Image (cartoon, rainbow, N blue to C red):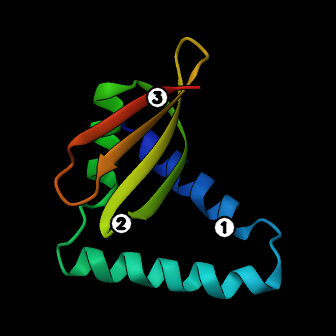
């Protein structure tokens, strides 16, 4: 993984969270963020840096978006990557184990 990728991703995440959003959505996002932080503290999910390294191995490029989703009780990171060929790929990665569950091309 590129050494300067993590700071760029962090900046992109901060900017995306700071973007104008309806006030009603703020409370929901805050609860999601708290739930993700709690899951990490309990060891139920891998840290985002580890997930990004896994994504880079399977789909090199620039990360566009990362979401932590509950898929019928199983936590899954959805990672969208803009590949070096200009195509967007979405990876589903098991949040607990880091196993790549699915890779899709947009």
Instruction: Name the residue at 66% across, 67% down.
Output: 17
Circle nearer the viewer, 1 or 2: 2
Tag of residue 104: 3
In the rendering, at what x and y percent does residue 83 appear? 52, 21
The residue shown at (51%, 56%) is: 10
Q: Mark 2, residues whose alpha carbon is within 10 Å: few (<14), some, or many (≥20)?
A: few
* Residue under numbered circle 2: 72
Q: Earlier in the sequence, mark 1 or mark 2?
A: 1
Looking at the rendering, which quadrant does residue 15 occupy? bottom right
- In this rendering, the label closer to the viewer, 3 or 2: 2
Q: Is residue 27 left or right of residue 6?
A: right
Residue under circle 1?
17
Q: How far is disc 1 from disc 2 in space, using C-alphas? A: 26 Å
Figure quadrant of the N terminus: top left
Q: Secondary structure at mark 1?
A: helix
Of pointers 3 and 1, the one earlier in the residue sequence: 1
Q: Is residue 32 above or below residue 17?
A: below
Identified at 20% across, 71% down, the residue is: 44
Q: Residues within 10 Å of mark 3 (few under 14, many from 20)?
A: few
Q: Nearer the viewer, residue 93 or 64?
A: 93
Residue 89 position (above or below residue 65): above
Pair 3/1: label in front: 3
Residue at image position (20%, 60%) is: 96
């Amino acid at each position: 993984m590129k050494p300067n990728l993590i700071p760029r991703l962090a900046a992109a995440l901060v900017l995306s969270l700071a973007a104008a959003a309806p006030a009603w959505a703020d409370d929901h996002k805050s609860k999601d963020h708290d739930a993700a932080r709690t899951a990490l503290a309990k060891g139920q999910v891998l840290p985002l840096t580890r997930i990004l390294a896994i994504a880079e191995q399977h789909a090199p490029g620039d990360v566009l978006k990362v979401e932590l989703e509950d898929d019928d009780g199983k936590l899954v990171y959805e990672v969208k990557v803009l590949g070096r060929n200009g195509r967007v790929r979405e990876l589903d990665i098991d949040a607990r184990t880091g196993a790549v569950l699915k890779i899709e091309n947009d």
